[in-house]
Each structure stands twice: as structure tokens, then as C-alpha cells.
Amino acid sequence: MKRLQIWLCLLGMIPFALLAQRQDELFNTGWKFHRGDVPEAAATSYNDADWQSLVLPHDWSIESPFSEEWASATGYLPGGIGWYRKAFTLPEGFAGKKVFIAFDGVYNNSEVWINGHYLGKRPNGFVAFEYELTPYLNKTGSNTIAVKADHTKFADSRWYTGSGIYRDVHLYAVNPVHIPQWGVMFTATNITARQAKARVQVNVNGPATGAEVRAVLMDAYGNRKGTARQKLVFNNGDSATKADLLFTVPTPALWSPESPSLYTLSVQLLVNGKPTDTWKEEVGIRDIRFTADSGFFLNGKNTKLKGVCIHDDAGVLGVAVPQEVWIRRLALLKAGGCNSIRMSHNPHAAYLYKLCDQMGFLVMEEAFDEWELGKNKWIKGWNKGSPGKDGYHEYFANWAEQDIASMVLRTRNSPSIIMWSIGNEIDYPNDPYSHEVLSTGRNPQIYGKGYLPDHPPAAQLGTLSARLVKAVKQLDTTRPVTAALAGVVMSNTTTYPDNLDLVGYNYQEYRYAEDHAAYPHRIIYGSENGMQLNNWNAVDSNRYISAQYLWTGIDYMGEAGLWPTRSNGAGLVNLGGFAKPEYWFRKSLWSSEPVLYIGSANVSRSNESGNWTHKLAEPVWNKRTADSISVRCFTNCEEVELFVNNRSLGRQQLASATNRILTWNLVYEPGTVTAKGYRQGKQVSSAALQTTGAPAGIKAEVYQHLMIPKQGSLQQIAVSLVDADGHVLYAPGNAITVTVSGSATLKGIENSNLSDTSLYKANSKKVANGPLMVYVKPPEDGSNYTVTFTAEGIPAKTLEL
């Protein structure tokens, strides 16, 4: 009976203990939206009954028609002004606490009001920020939050940014004595197989007497691997203080791309023995080191960074991309041998770093694409006509340190992040900086001819970079600071490279040996690189070059050519998330598992002609009989044998291939082409192409992944036209229409055609480059629904989900 009384007592305390802790709610539902400026919408009394109801995240630009009147830089889509409003009552348990609203990103120039009170403005559209609501809240009645996003300067970026509240929003409440946003930093040093020294630094807002911080580190199996505690001291009436906790982690499970082991760090704040706040986050233990002579070391192992650059968008979804889509994309890149991601050229959605932590990607995080002066933003096509100059530079002087702090503080506990980049191609020759040296020697990517004396001097790069490096190191000294340099020959005349821990070279492999000799203490790596084989050879054959970051991992909106091309096709993967031929060539370089891919091309068409030129080998075997045709094979097998209709055309050795591409030039005949790959004389892989007939059916496959919940997640459906034998047709040109039943929602159809300027949100698209990707959001109530695919003259296909 005594034990029962104690248990009931403890049970009665649980609700109080839980209510005393931090509460955090995803704040994405129940919003109203209006396109256009409505200044009176900031007032609580404003009637928004006729506004559009929606669930965040939301990108209004992607919902608009493409038009030549807008900018090629941002995908020929408009910007403008949009307003969001949400009425809410405080959730249970929020009363008596400090209440905050946290935005992961609003593009751009956002302004926020609560119950008519102005909270502030954040110009940068890529950074996370928050406001405290407490003084202006109705504790028991209704509250109204209003957000204005001003993207009137639609050509303010060199790529598509979208518009609106395009990332998650959270509402959270904490006690007066609490851990502030991003107030915990975890680091590990002296890492060996036997142990690691862990350090947990905690900011605490108070004040309070009898306060204490406790930290517990748990492994993936729930085992306690380290604990520490420290009493807090608030001096001289200070409203904030810090704790610095140290403990040892025995036999640490080290984080790496091959084994992304994570721990759960729990930090609890207590006042007079009662918990008042708890912070939990996944962290990892890994050792990173860059050297000038030997490149990058992870956990003591010399490692090449096989990286790709990415942008935020996902084609038809714009920049309001659900997490499930990035899981699919990252899984494909991982399967292709990629182990590193460059977050170009801005901080990305918070969940993306968690995915990199969990899936095992080494991350280069990047802050800015321009500093004090604007770069060229092309309006009529890349490098065509007169550029615009709108952009973040207008706010750099007043906001740079605050924005870079947001970047570092938000993700500094992610083990995936191994370097902070303060900028991309700020030194692009003559865009805007110039120097006399540009009239001599070799200067790639130069804008204009030689030195332009009316442009700002390059020396300013040294002053500004020192300022930004200092801002980063005030917050984190455990990772090196870098930047991606486009004009190294010009930057070498300044202090810019010397201010950096690592110096990234964009498209300047030819300078590696010369600069390594001239600057023996400089750590050089490839921060942005083209697809040519010799670009990878410059990494693979040089011990002192640790990385290559391909431009790009995935096709992206904007940075486009002349109308109607509205997207950039530089990626290994297309906008629908399907592998392109270049992906398979890269996998043959980067992956250790057997790789064998075959495709066809016209004999006269060659590869390797430019930085972003992709390998020509489409997965198609349709030609006129007796036409000349080239079969091209990408492999890491020692030799490959090719068969046409079971007739061998002989074996070829990879060691003898030009640029690692095995080629058979032959006369076309319909049927089947088969390749067999061999290692040490044993067949380890095969690939085939078939002659296909007219469209006769529709194939639809729902993507599944262990990290994607089966219920409620966005459905990603690969849809293809097939012939009578079930062979997938690569580019038949037929349109497929998608219809969903019930309260499910069609979110978009992506055909990966970079020049398709039909309305992006239409329910019908032509099959252009392999499968369509169809995105469907299931009903909120979890009920069953159907998705039906139809095409003229072809039997319909229905999925019951």
C-alpha cells in the first residue's frame, strides 16, 4: 500500500512536470493567404474571410504562369507581395510562459505583426528567425498573427528562390527561466576508439536562484553514455548565464557517411530541483581534419569528398519542398557514390541537415552569394542582354553578422557539417570586383574584357572576408571557414585567401599544382566543378586536393537560358528526381559496387566538350534500320561484352577506353542490346536496351523508403507510358492526365522538361524525359483514395491508396 501511495503521488506529479517543460507545436495549419499588398491586413480587425486557406509551407511564385516578362535568373516566374494571417488561441499549457514564433525561412523582406503590434523585419529570405509574442498576447481569447513578404524585386537572385512562407513555422512556449533558441552547443574532442571528451555549453535565460543544468547523452539503443551537471550562478542581477559541462564518452560510435551513428543529447534545466526546461537534439561524434599536403581526414581516415551542389527547389513544388522529396533525392545521390553536399548558396531548410546527419552526408554550409555589392542577375537569358543588380547586398552592411549567426547557431550541432562557407564567387572577375591582373594570364568565367577600372577594387574582398570569418569564429571554432572563389588569380592579390582556413576553387583545376607550390600552407579543394573526367582526375590523382563539388547534383529552377528555357539542366538528376545518363557515369567513378549502364547516341555527337556538358547516352534503342548508331557504356567493371540480338560484338577493356567510356559504333537493327560486365573474368552485372513500340499502357509506381512514414506522407508516384510488351517509353510525347478522388490533393506533375512553360500546376503533362513524377497529398483524415492516370487512346491506370 505504501508503494502504491508513492506511485500515485509520482503519477500525480507527471502532468505538472510536463506542463513545466518547454512546449513546441508545428504552426503550419490554419493560415489565410492573399496575393497583393493589403497594408490594413496587419490589424486584428481586418476581415480575411475571402482569403485563400492553406497549409504551410507555401510558395506562391510556383503557382503562377511562366512568362517572358519576368527574369530568366529566377525561372521566368513572378515575385510580388503576399500576406499571410492566422487566428489562434493559445494551446493548453502555454499560459504563464514566454511564447515565441519561429520561422525557418520567409522569402523575403518579411514583416510580422501580432494582434496589430509590429514585431520586426527580416530581409534575408534564407535564414531562420523568431519573435517573442508574450507581451501582446490575449491569454484566453483569440490572437492574430500577420506576415507580409515583399518579393517585389523579383530578379534579386541568380536562381529561383520562390516567394512566401516556404519553410516550417513553430510556436513554442518556455518558462521565464529557460534555454533560448539554439542555446546548446555540443562538441567532442580527443576522440579515440577508447573514448571521447564531450563538452556541452548551455545558455540560460533567467535569472533564478537554485538553478542547475544537467546533461545526459544516450546512444541509439537507449544506453546512457555520459552525464554531467552544474549549478548556475547569476551575477550582479544578470538576466542570463552559461553552463559548461564536461564528460567522457567511452568507446564512442563514430559518425561517418558509411555509419552515421547518432546520440541523443538531453539537457535539463532545474530550479530548486524541479525541471523547468528540457532541450533534446541528435548529435554525433566525429573527428575532422584538413591538411595542405594530404587533404581531408575523417576519424583519422584520409577521405575524398565526392560532392554535389544543390539548390532549394524541387521543380513543380517550388521551394516549399516536403521532407519526403529530399529523402528520395538524397537516397539516389547516396546510391550514386556521393558522400558530400554543398548547400549552395544559402542556408537550406532545417530538416535537410537532419537528413544529412541521419543518412550520412558531409556538408559544406554556405551563407551568401553576394556581399556589399550586387552581382549580375540575368533577365533575358544567362549572359544575355543587360543584367539587373537587385539582391541581398542592399542589406549586407546592417544584417550580415546577424544572418551568419543564424546560420551557424541553427545547425552547429549537426555532425554532418564540416565547414562554413562565407560566400560563393564573391570574387567573380568584374562582377563586380576588378584588378589589373585580369588583363594578364588565364581568368576563367571573366565578365567583360580584362581589367575594368570603373569597377570596385578587389582589395575590398580582404576587408569584408576578415569581418565574416570573425563573425563565424565567435560562434564556432570547431570547423574551418571557407569560401568558393571564382577568380583565384585576382583574389591572390588580396588578403582574402589568407583569411580563410580552406580555399575553395571554382572551375580552376588547372591552378591546383601551381598554387599548391606557390602557397604551400594553403589548403585547396574543388568547391564547384564541372562534369568532365579530367576535373575528377585532378582530385583523384592529387593527395592534397580533398574534394570535388559537381555543379550540380540536381537540375534546378532559374539560372536559365533564353525563353522558353526556364530551368537549368546541369544536374546528375533531373527535376523529377530521376537519374540522368551523367549520374551513371559519375557512379562508375564514385561507387565501389559493380556499375554498368548502356545508352545510345548519334555517332557524330561527342562528349566532354564543356564544364556542364553531359554524357550522351539515352536509354533508347529506336532508330531506322541500317542507320549508324553509337552504343556507349559507363562502367567500373574491368571489361564489358556487348550483344545485339544475342550476337556478340566482342569485349572491351575499361583500361583502354577513352575518357572511361566504352563505345561500339554499329549499324542499327531492331531488337535487344545487352551488355555484360566482368571482374576477374566473372560476370558481375548486366544491362539491356530494347526496341520499343507505340504507347499501349500506363505504369505507376509509388516510392517507398524506410524513413518515410506510410501514413500521411506526400506520395511520389513515378508514371510511365509502356508499349504492348511493358517496356518503358523514354520520350513518347503523349500527355498523361491525373485525377485524384476524395479529399486527396494533386500537388503537381513534373516531366523534367526544362522548356515546358505550360502552367506548372496543371493536372496534365507530356511525357518528355523518362517517367513523370506525380505528387499527391493524402487526405488529412487518413481515408482511402484513388489516383487515376489517363492518356488518349490508352487504357487508364488507377491506384487505390
Image: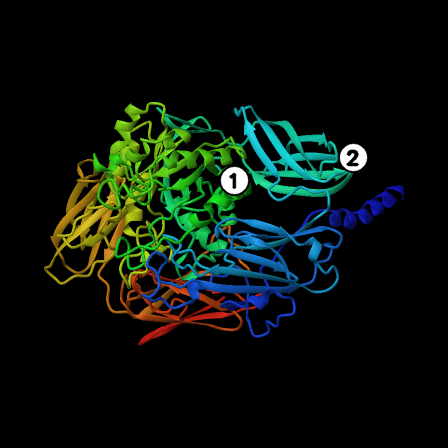
Q: Secondary structure at mark 1?
A: helix
Contact between labelled residues 2 and 1, with CB atoms less than 8 Å apart = no
Q: Disc 1 to disc 2, how far (Cα)? A: 31 Å
Give residue 566's position: percent from left, percent from top.
32, 60
Disc on the earlier residue, 1 or 2: 2
| Residue farthest front in this picture | 454
Question: Residue at (18%, 39%) from the top-left corner?
Answer: 657
Tell me the quarter of the picture where residue 668 sits. bottom left
In the rendered view, tell whether residue 550 sits above or below residue 726: above
Q: Nearer the viewer, residue 477 or 652?
A: 477
Question: Residue at (75%, 47%) from the top-left corner?
Answer: 20
Tell me the quarter of the picture where residue 187 sits. top right
Give residue 551's position: percent from left, percent from top.
33, 46
Q: Amino acid at mark 1?
A: Val
Q: Which residue is mark 2?
A: 210
Give residue 4's position: percent from left, percent from top.
86, 45
> Image check: 514 left or right of 602?
right
Give residue 114's position: percent from left, percent from top.
64, 59
In the rendered view, tell whether residue 284 sits above or below residue 323: above
Quadrant of the rendering where the N terminus is positioned: top right
Mark number, residue 527? none
Q: Nearer the viewer, residue 743 or 420?
A: 420
Question: Residue at (49%, 29%) from the top-left corner?
Answer: 287
Mark number, residue 408? 1
The colouring scheme, among rainbow, by chain, secondary structure or one colour, is: rainbow
> Image check: 722 left or right of 741?
left
Q: Amino acid at mark 2?
A: Gly
Q: Secondary structure at mark 2?
A: loop
Query: Is residue 680 in view?
Result: no
